[in-house]
Image (cartoon, helix red, strand yellow):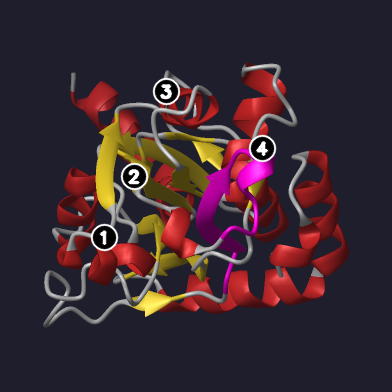
Amino acid sequence: MKTAVTVFSLLFILLSPNLSAAQDNHFIIGVEELDYLPFYSGEGKTYSGYARELLDAFAKERGYSFDYRPLPVKRLLDTFLKNKVDFKFPDNSNWQTDLKKGFQIIYSEPAIVCIDGVLVLPNNKGRGIEHLKKLGTVLGFTAWDYLDHIKQGTIAISENSSFQGLLKQVIIGRIDGAYINPEVARYQLERIMNQPRALVFDPVLPHTQSAYLLSTIKHPNIILEFNRFLKDKAALVEQLKKSHFMDVSNTP
Protein backbone atom coordinates (compact mmCIF):
# COMPACT_ATOMS: atom_id res chain seq x y z
CA MET A 1 0.00 0.00 0.00
CA LYS A 2 2.88 2.34 0.83
CA THR A 3 4.37 1.74 -2.60
CA ALA A 4 1.09 2.56 -4.33
CA VAL A 5 0.68 5.76 -2.34
CA THR A 6 4.27 6.77 -3.02
CA VAL A 7 3.92 6.19 -6.76
CA PHE A 8 0.65 8.12 -6.84
CA SER A 9 2.20 11.01 -4.91
CA LEU A 10 5.18 11.08 -7.25
CA LEU A 11 2.93 11.15 -10.32
CA PHE A 12 0.87 13.94 -8.79
CA ILE A 13 4.00 16.01 -8.12
CA LEU A 14 5.26 15.44 -11.66
CA LEU A 15 1.93 16.33 -13.24
CA SER A 16 1.09 19.29 -11.00
CA PRO A 17 3.03 21.90 -13.02
CA ASN A 18 1.19 20.86 -16.18
CA LEU A 19 -2.14 20.97 -14.39
CA SER A 20 -1.32 24.39 -13.01
CA ALA A 21 -0.34 25.65 -16.45
CA ALA A 22 -3.59 24.36 -17.92
CA GLN A 23 -5.59 26.10 -15.20
CA ASP A 24 -3.67 29.34 -15.72
CA ASN A 25 -4.70 29.32 -19.40
CA HIS A 26 -8.36 28.40 -18.84
CA PHE A 27 -10.93 31.15 -18.25
CA ILE A 28 -14.69 31.54 -17.96
CA ILE A 29 -16.41 34.36 -19.84
CA GLY A 30 -19.84 35.38 -18.61
CA VAL A 31 -22.10 36.18 -21.57
CA GLU A 32 -25.71 37.22 -22.05
CA GLU A 33 -28.35 34.51 -22.29
CA LEU A 34 -29.86 36.32 -25.23
CA ASP A 35 -30.34 35.78 -28.98
CA TYR A 36 -28.64 38.88 -30.35
CA LEU A 37 -27.37 37.60 -33.68
CA PRO A 38 -25.38 38.36 -35.71
CA PHE A 39 -23.38 39.71 -32.74
CA TYR A 40 -23.93 36.75 -30.41
CA SER A 41 -26.43 34.22 -29.13
CA GLY A 42 -26.33 32.76 -25.63
CA GLU A 43 -29.58 30.85 -26.00
CA GLY A 44 -29.47 27.06 -26.14
CA LYS A 45 -26.44 24.93 -25.30
CA THR A 46 -23.83 26.72 -27.40
CA TYR A 47 -22.64 30.31 -27.43
CA SER A 48 -22.40 31.44 -31.06
CA GLY A 49 -22.11 34.39 -33.42
CA TYR A 50 -19.44 36.95 -34.24
CA ALA A 51 -18.36 37.49 -30.61
CA ARG A 52 -17.76 33.76 -30.10
CA GLU A 53 -15.61 33.48 -33.22
CA LEU A 54 -13.66 36.62 -32.34
CA LEU A 55 -12.93 35.51 -28.78
CA ASP A 56 -12.09 31.98 -29.90
CA ALA A 57 -9.64 33.37 -32.48
CA PHE A 58 -7.97 35.42 -29.75
CA ALA A 59 -7.79 32.41 -27.42
CA LYS A 60 -6.22 30.27 -30.15
CA GLU A 61 -3.67 33.00 -30.93
CA ARG A 62 -2.58 33.28 -27.28
CA GLY A 63 -2.92 29.63 -26.23
CA TYR A 64 -5.90 30.19 -23.94
CA SER A 65 -9.02 28.11 -23.38
CA PHE A 66 -12.37 29.89 -22.93
CA ASP A 67 -15.61 28.49 -21.56
CA TYR A 68 -18.72 30.62 -22.09
CA ARG A 69 -21.35 30.82 -19.36
CA PRO A 70 -24.66 32.29 -20.59
CA LEU A 71 -26.63 34.06 -17.87
CA PRO A 72 -29.71 36.30 -17.76
CA VAL A 73 -28.65 39.91 -18.34
CA LYS A 74 -29.42 41.09 -14.80
CA ARG A 75 -27.72 38.11 -13.13
CA LEU A 76 -24.64 38.35 -15.35
CA LEU A 77 -23.33 41.56 -13.77
CA ASP A 78 -23.85 40.26 -10.23
CA THR A 79 -22.00 37.05 -11.10
CA PHE A 80 -19.16 39.05 -12.62
CA LEU A 81 -18.82 41.41 -9.65
CA LYS A 82 -18.69 38.42 -7.29
CA ASN A 83 -15.70 37.07 -9.27
CA LYS A 84 -17.56 33.92 -10.28
CA VAL A 85 -16.45 34.44 -13.89
CA ASP A 86 -13.15 35.79 -15.21
CA PHE A 87 -14.54 38.09 -17.88
CA LYS A 88 -17.82 39.68 -18.94
CA PHE A 89 -18.99 40.23 -22.50
CA PRO A 90 -20.44 42.52 -23.57
CA ASP A 91 -19.74 45.34 -21.16
CA ASN A 92 -19.30 49.10 -21.20
CA SER A 93 -18.12 51.60 -18.60
CA ASN A 94 -21.38 53.54 -19.08
CA TRP A 95 -23.63 50.59 -18.22
CA GLN A 96 -25.07 50.10 -14.72
CA THR A 97 -22.59 52.55 -13.20
CA ASP A 98 -24.42 52.67 -9.87
CA LEU A 99 -23.93 48.93 -9.33
CA LYS A 100 -20.25 49.07 -10.32
CA LYS A 101 -19.20 51.69 -7.78
CA GLY A 102 -16.17 50.58 -5.78
CA PHE A 103 -15.05 47.94 -8.28
CA GLN A 104 -11.84 48.27 -10.30
CA ILE A 105 -13.05 47.05 -13.70
CA ILE A 106 -10.73 47.02 -16.70
CA TYR A 107 -12.27 47.37 -20.14
CA SER A 108 -10.91 46.45 -23.54
CA GLU A 109 -10.99 48.46 -26.72
CA PRO A 110 -14.29 48.03 -28.62
CA ALA A 111 -14.87 44.54 -29.94
CA ILE A 112 -18.08 45.77 -31.57
CA VAL A 113 -19.26 49.29 -32.34
CA CYS A 114 -22.90 49.53 -33.32
CA ILE A 115 -25.93 51.78 -33.50
CA ASP A 116 -29.17 51.61 -31.55
CA GLY A 117 -32.01 53.40 -33.28
CA VAL A 118 -35.48 53.11 -34.74
CA LEU A 119 -36.74 50.98 -37.61
CA VAL A 120 -39.90 52.08 -39.41
CA LEU A 121 -41.96 51.17 -42.44
CA PRO A 122 -40.24 52.41 -45.63
CA ASN A 123 -43.00 54.96 -46.30
CA ASN A 124 -42.49 56.50 -42.86
CA LYS A 125 -38.74 57.01 -43.16
CA GLY A 126 -37.70 60.64 -42.69
CA ARG A 127 -41.05 61.87 -41.33
CA GLY A 128 -39.47 63.05 -38.08
CA ILE A 129 -39.99 62.43 -34.39
CA GLU A 130 -43.36 64.19 -34.32
CA HIS A 131 -44.82 61.21 -36.22
CA LEU A 132 -43.43 58.72 -33.70
CA LYS A 133 -46.26 58.26 -31.22
CA LYS A 134 -45.82 54.64 -30.14
CA LEU A 135 -42.33 53.16 -29.88
CA GLY A 136 -41.59 49.49 -29.28
CA THR A 137 -38.70 47.89 -27.38
CA VAL A 138 -37.75 44.38 -26.35
CA LEU A 139 -38.46 43.66 -22.70
CA GLY A 140 -35.46 44.71 -20.61
CA PHE A 141 -34.08 47.17 -23.17
CA THR A 142 -34.15 50.93 -22.66
CA ALA A 143 -34.76 53.48 -25.43
CA TRP A 144 -32.23 55.94 -24.01
CA ASP A 145 -32.64 58.53 -26.76
CA TYR A 146 -36.36 58.84 -26.08
CA LEU A 147 -36.56 58.96 -22.27
CA ASP A 148 -37.42 62.68 -22.17
CA HIS A 149 -40.21 62.21 -24.73
CA ILE A 150 -41.54 59.23 -22.79
CA LYS A 151 -41.54 61.21 -19.52
CA GLN A 152 -43.33 64.09 -21.24
CA GLY A 153 -45.96 61.70 -22.59
CA THR A 154 -45.38 62.53 -26.26
CA ILE A 155 -44.19 58.98 -26.96
CA ALA A 156 -45.69 55.81 -25.49
CA ILE A 157 -43.61 52.67 -25.01
CA SER A 158 -44.76 49.17 -25.95
CA GLU A 159 -42.63 46.22 -24.77
CA ASN A 160 -42.35 42.87 -26.51
CA SER A 161 -40.73 39.66 -25.32
CA SER A 162 -38.95 38.92 -28.62
CA PHE A 163 -37.27 40.72 -31.52
CA GLN A 164 -39.49 38.97 -34.04
CA GLY A 165 -42.62 39.99 -32.18
CA LEU A 166 -41.39 43.56 -31.97
CA LEU A 167 -40.65 43.82 -35.68
CA LYS A 168 -44.00 42.23 -36.59
CA GLN A 169 -45.80 44.92 -34.57
CA VAL A 170 -44.21 47.61 -36.73
CA ILE A 171 -44.92 45.74 -39.96
CA ILE A 172 -48.65 45.41 -39.21
CA GLY A 173 -48.89 49.00 -37.94
CA ARG A 174 -49.59 48.44 -34.26
CA ILE A 175 -46.61 50.63 -33.33
CA ASP A 176 -44.80 53.36 -35.27
CA GLY A 177 -41.25 52.14 -34.80
CA ALA A 178 -38.98 49.60 -33.11
CA TYR A 179 -36.01 50.72 -31.01
CA ILE A 180 -33.43 48.09 -31.91
CA ASN A 181 -29.97 47.61 -33.30
CA PRO A 182 -30.29 47.77 -37.12
CA GLU A 183 -27.93 44.82 -37.64
CA VAL A 184 -29.96 42.63 -35.28
CA ALA A 185 -33.15 43.74 -37.04
CA ARG A 186 -31.66 43.06 -40.47
CA TYR A 187 -30.60 39.57 -39.37
CA GLN A 188 -34.11 38.81 -38.10
CA LEU A 189 -35.83 40.23 -41.18
CA GLU A 190 -33.54 38.53 -43.71
CA ARG A 191 -32.60 35.23 -42.09
CA ILE A 192 -35.54 34.41 -39.82
CA MET A 193 -38.65 36.23 -41.04
CA ASN A 194 -37.90 36.24 -44.79
CA GLN A 195 -39.03 39.88 -45.07
CA PRO A 196 -35.75 41.66 -45.89
CA ARG A 197 -37.19 45.00 -46.99
CA ALA A 198 -40.19 45.22 -44.69
CA LEU A 199 -38.55 47.80 -42.37
CA VAL A 200 -35.71 50.33 -42.67
CA PHE A 201 -33.48 52.19 -40.24
CA ASP A 202 -34.40 55.89 -40.00
CA PRO A 203 -31.23 57.97 -39.45
CA VAL A 204 -33.31 61.14 -39.03
CA LEU A 205 -34.68 59.87 -35.72
CA PRO A 206 -32.49 60.02 -32.57
CA HIS A 207 -30.01 57.17 -32.35
CA THR A 208 -26.90 56.27 -30.35
CA GLN A 209 -23.58 54.67 -31.19
CA SER A 210 -22.47 52.22 -28.53
CA ALA A 211 -19.52 49.89 -27.99
CA TYR A 212 -19.35 46.33 -26.70
CA LEU A 213 -16.19 45.67 -24.68
CA LEU A 214 -14.57 42.74 -22.90
CA SER A 215 -14.15 43.46 -19.19
CA THR A 216 -12.39 41.90 -16.21
CA ILE A 217 -11.53 42.52 -12.59
CA LYS A 218 -8.89 39.80 -12.25
CA HIS A 219 -6.92 39.70 -15.51
CA PRO A 220 -5.87 43.15 -16.78
CA ASN A 221 -2.89 41.69 -18.64
CA ILE A 222 -5.21 39.62 -20.84
CA ILE A 223 -7.23 42.72 -21.68
CA LEU A 224 -4.00 44.33 -22.91
CA GLU A 225 -3.33 41.24 -25.03
CA PHE A 226 -6.85 41.37 -26.45
CA ASN A 227 -6.38 45.03 -27.38
CA ARG A 228 -3.19 44.14 -29.22
CA PHE A 229 -4.98 41.28 -30.98
CA LEU A 230 -7.73 43.62 -32.22
CA LYS A 231 -5.09 45.94 -33.66
CA ASP A 232 -2.66 43.39 -35.10
CA LYS A 233 -5.39 41.15 -36.56
CA ALA A 234 -7.56 43.91 -37.99
CA ALA A 235 -7.91 42.08 -41.33
CA LEU A 236 -9.16 38.94 -39.57
CA VAL A 237 -11.59 41.00 -37.47
CA GLU A 238 -13.04 42.60 -40.60
CA GLN A 239 -13.34 39.22 -42.29
CA LEU A 240 -15.28 37.84 -39.33
CA LYS A 241 -17.65 40.80 -39.42
CA LYS A 242 -18.35 40.35 -43.10
CA SER A 243 -18.96 36.64 -42.65
CA HIS A 244 -21.70 37.48 -40.14
CA PHE A 245 -23.41 40.00 -42.41
CA MET A 246 -22.34 42.93 -40.26
CA ASP A 247 -21.95 46.44 -41.62
CA VAL A 248 -18.20 46.97 -41.18
CA SER A 249 -18.63 50.73 -41.52
CA ASN A 250 -20.25 50.74 -38.06
CA THR A 251 -17.63 48.55 -36.39
CA PRO A 252 -13.90 48.91 -35.71
Disc 3 and disc 4: Cα gap in Å? 14 Å
Q: Can residue 56 be seen in this snapshot?
A: no
Does residue 85 appear left or right of residue 109 in this picture?
left
Image mark for residue 154: 1
Q: Earlier in the sequence, mark 2 or mark 3?
A: 2
Residue 146: x %, y % from top left: 33, 64
Judging from the image, what secondary structure is the residue with disc 3 in? helix
Three-letter code, disc 3:
Gly
- Residue at image coords 42%, 45%: 19
Q: Which residue is mark 2?
A: 134
**Residue 40 picture quarter:** top right
Relative depth, front residue between 43 and 122: 122
Q: Read off the magenta span.
A: 110-127
Q: Which residue is mark 4?
A: 186
Three-letter code, disc 1:
Thr
- Residue at image coords 39%, 70%: 92
Q: Nearer the viewer, mark 2 or mark 3?
A: 2
